Image (cartoon, helix red, strand yellow):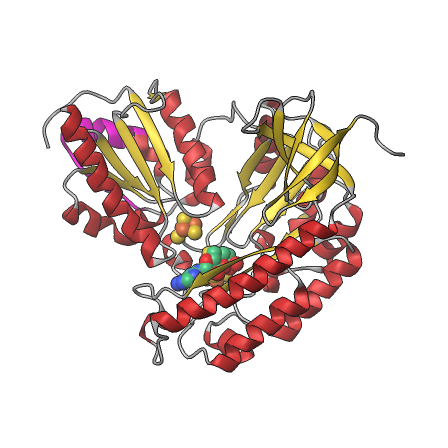
Amino acid sequence: MRQRDLPRTYRVKSFGCQMNVYDGERMAELLSEQGITPAPEGEEADLVVLNTCHIREKAAEKVYSDIGRLVKAGEEAGRKPMIAVAGCVAQAEGEEIMARAPAVGMVVGPQAYHRLPEMIVKAASGTRATDTDMPADAKFAALPKRRKSGPSAFLTIQEGCDKFCTYCVVPYTRGAEISRPFSDLLREAERLVEAGAREITLLGQNVNAWTGEDDKGRALGFDGLIRALADMSGLARIRYTTSHPNDVTDGLIAAHGEVDKLMPYLHLPVQSGSDPVLKAMNRSHTVESYLRLLERFRAARPDIALSGDFIVGFPGESEADFAATLALVDAVGYAQAYSFKYSPRPGTPAAIMDDQIAAEVMDERLQRLQAAINRDQYAFNKASLGTTCEVLVERRGKLPGQWLGKTPWLQSAWFEGDVQIGDLVQVELVEAGPNSLAGMLRETVAA
Ligand code: SAH
Ligand code: SF4
Ligand code: F3S
């Protein structure tokens, strides 16, 4: 690679989960601190960071098509963008990317991106660099302070995964489970609130596996962290994702009944409604134990909205196994749920299992599952009609005077009125669609 100027503008493109969104924001802050500015809308950036996801085949392939597009756009404009590949594809396939895509100057894993500034200097002097070390705690200490935030902010509190579900790449791309220290999290949450956040979503691959110690050295579980954050006066709402059934504690369930700021929403992936499939997935919970947990959450917080993740077409999944998944969906009545076709990932045990399921079978099952989930989501929205609830105003709508915000149950609600981004307002839900609700602003709060 030739010597070149340091980049003056950047763009970070994040794919995948919310933890990647969080990392993307932190990378942007880090680059801004170096004096590199965000590229204006519609303009090519000098430095493009592709913050990638490796969870399914399609997601991983996207990175190569994106690199191709960037190179082509650069050629047309007569310049070469500096390209960094970050995120989980970088971690899993760093060497391969370097070999396959000469236009890429830097490969940086999810636990090493705090070292981007040095890598940029190297890349500018013509040295391509790969950094996929995994010292997650070092990363957070090296990142700049939070200065900007929208009304709803993400805060990564836990990283990595020790669960090794047989289909999943996360334990390999994100490393072992680690919890960020309590005091660091309180400080970052305070900064986010000072910067404008009214709602914080706590993030982790297994967010409820978080453990820590308070300032007196007493052990704290995830519910203890939630309770401590709830004491922060400027913070109005707390959410979290993604939680794992095996890390649910009595304290967390109780917190849903006791902590007003903890929103009535639970994303608890189950993946399948069939015990033999769950066993082959190494989920180490059963359908029954999962349903019992949901019952207990509902007992603590009767209006809680439930969400989950499903995989269809896991190796060996029979029609009867799939029917059990549909039965589980019917039994729970999810307010929202995500479903995916099984995607064999290199290096995972499931990728080499017998009885891989044919693509047409997966397609057909996914359609049936999504129809059931959509039906329940629509039903949940319709059941909210007539409710007046608190909405956090997040952005302007498409029409003048229109605003978009989120209900406590994470539904999108549209309404008109004289409000500002970041306001918490009372809205009566008057019209329900499959994916959002229309509301009327109510000036006065019923006592
Ligand atoms: N840590 C979280 C989420 C992990 S990834 C959890 O355990 O719940 C988000 C979702 O992607 C998973 O819940 C799963 O439904 C899906 N997923 C993961 N690996 C997959 C694969 N190989 N093929 C299809 N879907 C997958
Ligand atoms: Fe992947 Fe399972 Fe870990 Fe979730 S719990 S990140 S699905 S290995
Ligand atoms: Fe994707 Fe990595 Fe998140 S693989 S889902 S970006 S942890």
Task: Locate residue 357, reporting x and y percent.
Answer: 37, 75
Task: Locate residue 255, reporting x and y percent.
Answer: 74, 50
Question: 405 or 197, which lies in front?
Answer: 405
Q: Residue at x 22, y 38 (%)?
A: 69
Question: 349 or 186, which lies in front?
Answer: 349
The part of the image, by quadrant, that contains residue 238 is: top right
Q: Is residue 135 left or right of residue 156?
A: left
The quadrant of the picture occupied by the N terminus is top left
Furthest residue in direction right, as rendered: 447
Q: Using the rendered image of the protein, determine whether residue 306 is visible from the camera's viewpoint.
A: no
**Count of residue discs:** 0
Question: 383 or 318, which lies in front?
Answer: 383
**Which stretch did the figure color magenta?**
117-132
Q: Is residue 354 left or right of residue 23?
A: left
Q: Residue at x 73, y 56 (%)?
A: 253
Q: Is residue 84 above or below residue 162?
A: above
Q: Is residue 355 left or right of residue 210?
A: left
The part of the image, by quadrant, that contains residue 106 is: top left
Task: Locate residue 268, reporting x and y percent.
Answer: 60, 58
Q: Indicate yes or no whether the magenta region holds residue 192.
A: no
Q: Is residue 223 above or below residue 397?
A: below
The part of the image, by quadrant, that contains residue 349 is: bottom left
Q: Using the rendered image of the protein, determine whether residue 152 is visible from the camera's viewpoint.
A: yes
Q: Residue at x 43, y 44 (%)?
A: 136
Task: Locate residue 348, reporting x and y percent.
Answer: 35, 67
The quadrant of the picture occupied by the C terminus is top right
